[in-house]
């Protein structure tokens, strides 16, 4: 199987395993789906701690308002009594005014925190260092873990306007957010290798040959952004090793220079004739007028 090390810019994303016979069209779709799926998992994982600390999201027309403003406008959160966490709820006011403050108890919080850690680890870019290829099934597994944990803590579900539920139902609105800049629509995705765009009408073997044991670095990006920067000849890890070797070599040379220092030969105590001259009264002789 061909192993692709997928990057976005200089940042490692995943390892992906495929065959040389795969079409670039299919390959682009598969990698793009995993890439965007990992972003979805990250977005959900960033929202769940807020859910654990401050409860479910308020309706959009109540977010950011003070208690006095809510009373003055006679607004009511009709989902407050429906979306109650398992066990006893603990009130912790959300200073940003996004959530209702009815947080789950400590035991339920731990369920959410632990699941977030497990889901992140499953699709983390650290899997590249571990030489583990990430698949779409692993992304779906991470989403299922998060969905299951939320259902345990909130058996009646989340309100339809909660960003976590919207993510699970693929109804999220990322317009105007930083997250929207990271997502790559499948029809706009491009794969690049060795400063060459992998054209969708071809197969992978048209670029890398028919060797199934090939390992290459490909970069994913949006159409119209031009060719990505070439990979450095020396990797960051290799550069660190070279700098460490150079530093150690400099230290060794410095010690050798110190060991070869013969300036001590000019010292009085190293003069073999000093004792003889002292007995003969030839020490401290000064030439010149007194």
Image (cartoon, rainbow, N blue to C red):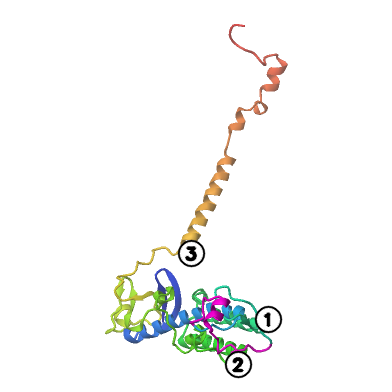
Disc nearest the viewer among 3 and 1: 1
- Label 2 sits on residue: 155
Q: Quadrant of residue 179?
A: bottom left
Q: Secondary structure at mark 2?
A: loop
In percent of width and height, residue 208 lies at 33, 78
Assess disc 1: are there few (<14), some (14-19) or many (≥20) residues with their C-alpha within 10 Å of its C-alpha.
Answer: some
* Along the line of sight, the residue nearer the viewer: 145 or 235: 145
Left or right of 178 in this view: 63: right
Disc nearest the viewer among 3 and 2: 2
Q: Are marks 3 and 1 in contact (CB under 8 Å)?
A: no
In percent of width and height, residue 120 lies at 54, 79
**The residue stretch that appears in magenta:** 60-87
- Residue 142, compared with residue 232, is above or below; it is below
- Residue 75, compared with residue 228, is above or below; it is below
- Label 3 sits on residue: 237
Residue 1 seen in the current view = no
Q: Secondary structure at mark 1?
A: helix
> The C terminus lies in which quarter of the figure?
top right
Magenta region includes residue 256? no
In percent of width and height, residue 95 lies at 58, 73
- Label 1 sits on residue: 106
- Residue 71, compared with residue 152, is above or below; it is above
View extreme (left): residue: 201
- Residue 275, compared with residue 24, is above or below; it is above
């Amino acid at each position: 199987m061909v192993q692709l090390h997928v990057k976005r810019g200089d940042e490692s994303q995943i390892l992906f395993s495929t065959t040389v016979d795969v079409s670039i069209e299919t390959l682009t779709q598969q990698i793009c789906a995993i890439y965007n799926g990992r972003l979805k998992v990250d977005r959900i994982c960033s929202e769940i701690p807020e859910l654990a600390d401050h409860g479910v999201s308020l309706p959009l027309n109540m977010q950011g308002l003070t208690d006095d403003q809510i009373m003055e406008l006679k607004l009511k959160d009709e989902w407050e009594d429906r979306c109650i966490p398992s066990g006893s709820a603990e009130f912790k006011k959300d200073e940003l005014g996004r959530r209702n403050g009815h947080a789950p108890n400590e035991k339920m919080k731990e369920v959410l925190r632990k699941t977030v850690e497990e889901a992140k680890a499953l699709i983390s870019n650290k899997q590249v260092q571990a030489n583990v290829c990430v698949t779409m099934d692993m992304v779906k597994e991470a989403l299922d873990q998060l969905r299951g944990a939320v259902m345990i803590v909130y058996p009646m579900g989340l309100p339809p306007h909660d960003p976590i539920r919207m993510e699970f139902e693929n109804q999220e609105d990322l317009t105007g957010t930083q997250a929207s800049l990271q997502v790559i629509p499948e029809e706009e995705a491009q794969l690049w290798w060795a400063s060459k765009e992998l054209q969708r009408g071809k197969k992978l073997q048209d670029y890398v040959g028919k060797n199934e044991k090939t390992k290459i670095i490909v970069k994913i990006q949006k159409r119209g952004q031009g060719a990505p920067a070439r990979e450095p000849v020396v990797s960051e890890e290799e550069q660190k090793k070279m700098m460490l070797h150079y530093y150690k070599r400099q230290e060794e040379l410095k010690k050798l220079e110190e060991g070869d220092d013969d300036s001590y030969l000019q010292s009085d105590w190293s003069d073999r004739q000093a004792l003889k001259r002292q007995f003969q009264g030839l020490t401290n002789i000064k030439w010149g007028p007194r």
